[in-house]
Image (cartoon, rainbow, N blue to C red):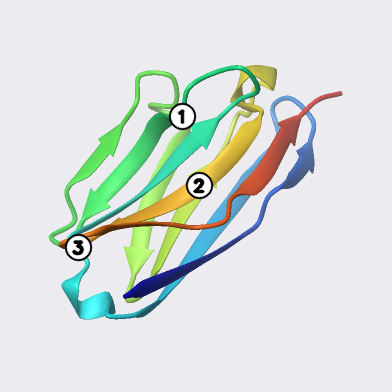
Amino acid sequence: QVQLVESGGGLVQPGGSLRLSCAASGSIFSIAVMGWYRQAPGKQRERVATITSSGTTFYSDAVKERFTISRDKNTVYLQMNGLKPEDTAVYYCKAVTANTYWGQGTQVTVSS
C-alpha cells in the first residue's frame, strides 16, 4: 500500500509560479513511477509529467519548457512556471507499483 499526500496548490496570477509536492508513505520502495495528472472542469484527466525510479522524465506538450518534475526520496515535486489560465485544474499525484495509487488532488487556479 502507498499513501500520497499533495500540497502546494492555490491561486496565482498568469505568469506566476507554484510548486506542488506529493509525499509518499507506505511501500515506497516498490514505486516504479510517480507523476502528476490534472483534470479541468468538464475535461478528462490528463497526464502532465512523470518520473521513473531511474529518473527518466516525461512532459506533455502543453507544459514542456514551463514545468519541471523532480523526485527526492519519497517526495515528488512539480515546479510550475509561466502559468497560464488553461493550467487551471485539480492536480493529482499518482504512484505506480504493481498497483496504481492516487492522491486526493490539489486545486490550482490561474487567474488575474
* Mark 1 → mark 3, Cα distance in angstroms: 20 Å
Disc 3, SS: loop
* Mark 3 → mark 2, Cα distance in angstroms: 16 Å
Disc 1, SS: loop
**Cβ–Cβ below 8 Å for labels 1 and 3?**
no
Disc 2, SS: strand
Q: Is residue 107 left or right of residue 63?
A: right
Question: Which residue corresponds to mark 1?
Answer: 45
**Picture quadrant where residue 54 is located:** bottom left
Q: Is residue 93 left or right of residue 86?
A: left
Amino acid carrying mark 2 in the image: Tyr
Instruction: Please give the label number shown on residue 32.
Output: none
Amino acid carrying mark 3 in the image: Thr
Q: Please name the residue shown 26% across and 50% down the image.
A: 51
Amino acid carrying mark 1 in the image: Arg
Q: Is residue 75 left or right of residue 33?
A: right
Question: In the image shown, does 7 or 17 lie closer to the viewer?
Answer: 7
Q: Please name the residue shown 69% across and 27% down the image.
A: 15
Instruction: Please give the label number shown on residue 97.
Output: 3
Residue extending farthest to the bottom is 26
When the figure is inspected, residue 86 is found, relative to residue 6, above or below; the finding is above
Percent of width and height locating residue 83 = 63, 29
Instruction: Please give the label number shown on residue 92.
Output: 2
Percent of width and height locating residue 14 = 74, 25
* Mark 2 → mark 1, Cα distance in angstroms: 9 Å
Q: Please name the residue shown 60% across and 25% down the image.
A: 40
When the figure is inspected, residue 73 is found, relative to residue 61, above or below; the finding is below
Instruction: Tell me the crowding category of disc 3: few under 14, some 14 to 19, or many 20 or more residues within 10 angstroms, Cα based.
Output: some
